[in-house]
Amino acid sequence: MALEIRQQLRQAQVPIMTPQLQQAIKLLQCNHIEVMQALEQELKENPILEVAAFDESLSEQENDSRSDLKSLEENAEEVPQPEREVIDPDWESYLESYGGDRGTGQKDSSAQRPLENMASYSETLFHSLVRQLQLSPIERDDRRIALQLIGNVDEHGYLDIDLQTVAVSLGVELERVERVLTEVQKFDPTGIAARNLRECLLLQARVLEEPSPLAVQILEEAFEQFKKGRLDQVARKLKVSLEDIKQASKVICSLNPKPGSSFHETDTIYVVPDIYVIKVGNDYSVVLNDDGVPRLRISPFYQRELHSGMASPAARDYIQEKMRAAAWLIKSIHQRQRTIYKVTQSIIKFQKEFFDKGIDYLRPLILRDVANDVEMHESTISRVTTNKYVHTPRGIFELKYFFNSGIRHGNDSIASESVKNQILRIVKGENRDKPASDKQIADELARYHIHIARRTVAKYRELLGIPPSSERRQKF
């Protein structure tokens, strides 16, 4: 049979990722704060978009664009709010505490702004060390070396650079760098700029208010044995009694292995929930967090300009393009809210026992279960539940928290998070002198009809940040 090349036309449906669809997918996987930032950026770039007041009535066209939220509004239950006591404010006292200075005369301390209303400043470890460097007797020529060392102190207070590297980069002798490091290690907090754990503890042990020569000797001569908890070997090596070694070990354990931990290098990041789950009677109501989200609309001015017929063809094309982008953005936001609402309702339906009784009743759940329930694709459920948090009567959880693999529990199955909680309880209630091994924890779980292997216990223990039994044992 001869081979030949032919051209053939055929119609087929294939998905195409248009820019509008990409925008909708991106908004779907954004959390509350990221959505607010995206809307703020869009308001700057698209002049057609405006922020409408919440008490302002919408036009007929805007009502049509919100029709996809009609089912959401009909299903949402109004949560009764408790009556609040109306307090008549004391304006005179308010003005005395918060009012600006209107006169040039000196005021007493009661007229100043309260201290709790002033912004606090948290000094970083780097700034603290630089301030101490400026007040130190280190010579001017050596301060360049000291500043290089301080800049390479990590968040825990350890020196994160080799001294030979510092000497080569600054073109100085290694002995000079070591001498400057000795001066920097005298700064507060004690133990700062140490090169390893042993040096950090030694710096602190040598300046204790109640000196312990044996603790210093242990760190200098038998640190490896001490670190492994072999106190009997330490006693034989130093030729002292085991009781004296235990007393010195208590002194070492009272030292701070991370001297820089008292300084917070970054601000606290607070979790803003996207959904609130409120218990009303025996049921749970889902309320979306719209706090701070602007109410978008299409500008009436540009609508009139488009239909007036006075705009140039280029201006009309520009307005129409921006208007289509604005309408799609508004629709995408509403679709995102409706999707999150439906997925959260489905999670509550599957995990109602968790909300009623606690973590021990968390059931196994996979993305396919929720996807089949709400008639959506698994990838959509994955985007909705990623990096989004829900505020519930049981606390604040990421939506991914409710999806767990199943572990055999008698004739039924139990969620892996519930098993982790059981392991945590066993470890908290164990004897510190004889902590439970992974095999003993597995046997204890079997008493509750939870059958898992020892290696599974080890995996869950490591995820919980629990050290092995050899490290949990109380040695003195």
Image: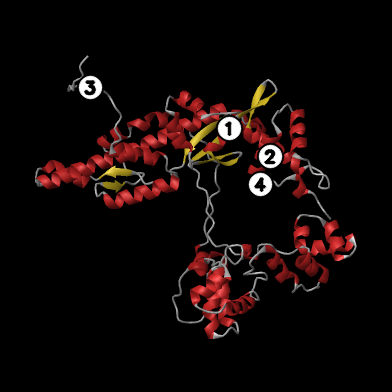
Residue to which mark 3 is pinned: 11
Residue 153: percent from left, percent from top: 57, 67
Closer to the camera: disc 1 or disc 2? 2
Q: What is the distance, in whole Å, between disc 1 and disc 4 at their CAs?
A: 19 Å
Q: Give whichever of discs 4 and 2 has the lower sequence position.
A: 2
Amino acid type, label 2: Ala
Residue 112: percent from left, percent from top: 53, 72
Image vertical order of residue 146 relative to residue 441, above or below: below
Q: Residues at badges 2 and 3 in contact (C-beta under 8 Å)? A: no
Locate residue 437 relative to residue 132 in the image: left or right: right
Q: Residue at x 50, y 44 (%)?
A: 273
Name the mark on residue 465. Answer: 4
Q: Which SS class for mark 2?
A: helix
Image vertical order of residue 223 relative to residue 87, above or below: below
Residue to which mark 1 is pinned: 404
Closer to the camera: disc 4 or disc 2? 2
Amino acid type, label 3: Gln
Q: What is the distance, in whole Å, between disc 3 and disc 4 at their CAs?
A: 57 Å
Number of labels in the image equals 4
Q: Which SS class for mark 1?
A: loop
Q: Quadrant of residue 214?
A: bottom right
Identity of the residue furthest to the top in this view: 1
Badge 3 density bin: few <14, some 14–19, many ≥20, Cα 10 Å: few
Q: Quadrant of the N terminus?
A: top left
Q: Give whichever of discs 1 and 2 has the lower sequence position.
A: 1
Q: Give whichever of discs 3 and 1 has the lower sequence position.
A: 3
Residue to which mark 2 is pinned: 458
Q: Residue at x 64, y 77 (%)?
A: 182
Closer to the camera: disc 3 or disc 1? 3
Q: What is the distance, in whole Å, between disc 2 and disc 3 at their CAs?
A: 56 Å
